[in-house]
Image (spheres, helix red, strand yellow):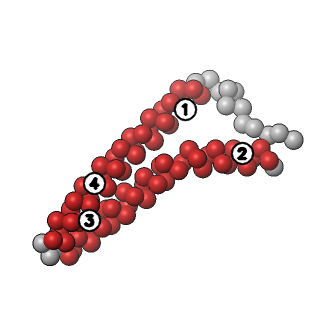
Amino acid sequence: MDVFPDFDGLAGIGDLKQVVGALFMFVLIIAVLMLIVSAICWAIAAAHGNYSAAAKGRVGVLVALGAAVLAGGGVAWMNWLIALGQRL
């Protein structure tokens, strides 16, 4: 039995896909910019011996990296779930 969601069943689903794609793009751009700024703050703070600010920069790098991975993998994960649903 082939079960597949009917993406054409709703009016405006193409516009929704474009909006979601644009939101993923903005999330990835902001995450990369946050990664760059946090890495610079981490490096400068560590070089000057300010370990509290260095720890905050390190947390910023990890959060930005996690956001970029989650946003970038969102489409692949959704495609995997749709493929999994077809095999059930």
Q: CA–CA distance between discs 4 and 3?
A: 10 Å
Marks 2 and 1 sit apart, C-alpha to C-alpha, by 18 Å
Going from the N terminus, do you reach mark 4 or mark 3 first? Answer: 4
Question: Which residue is outermost to the top?
Answer: 11
C-alpha distance separating marks 3 and 1: 34 Å
Nearest to the eye among marks 2 and 1: give it.
2
Q: Say what amino acid the circle numbered 3 marks.
A: Gly
What residue sits right under mark 2 in the picture? 83
Residue at numbered disc 4: 36
Residue 3 image-quadrant placement = top right
Residue at point 61% right, 46% down?
78
Q: Earlier in the sequence, mark 2 or mark 4?
A: 4
What distance separates the C-alpha of mark 2 from that of mark 4? 35 Å
Residue at 27 percent of width and 72 percent of height:
55
Marked residue nearer the N-terminal end (1 or 4): 1
Residue 25: x %, y % from top left: 42, 39
Q: CA distance from mark 3 to mark 2?
A: 39 Å
State the CA–CA distance, disc 1 to disc 4.
29 Å
Badge 1: how crowded within 10 Å, few (<14), some, or many (20+)?
few
Q: Which residue is mark 1?
A: 17
Instruction: Tell me the crowding category of disc 3: few under 14, some 14 to 19, or many 20 or more residues within 10 angstroms, Cα based.
Output: many
Secondary structure under the numbered disc 3 in the rendered image: helix
Q: Mark 1 belongs to which amino acid?
A: Lys
26 lies left or right of 54: right
Kind of residue at disc 4: Ile
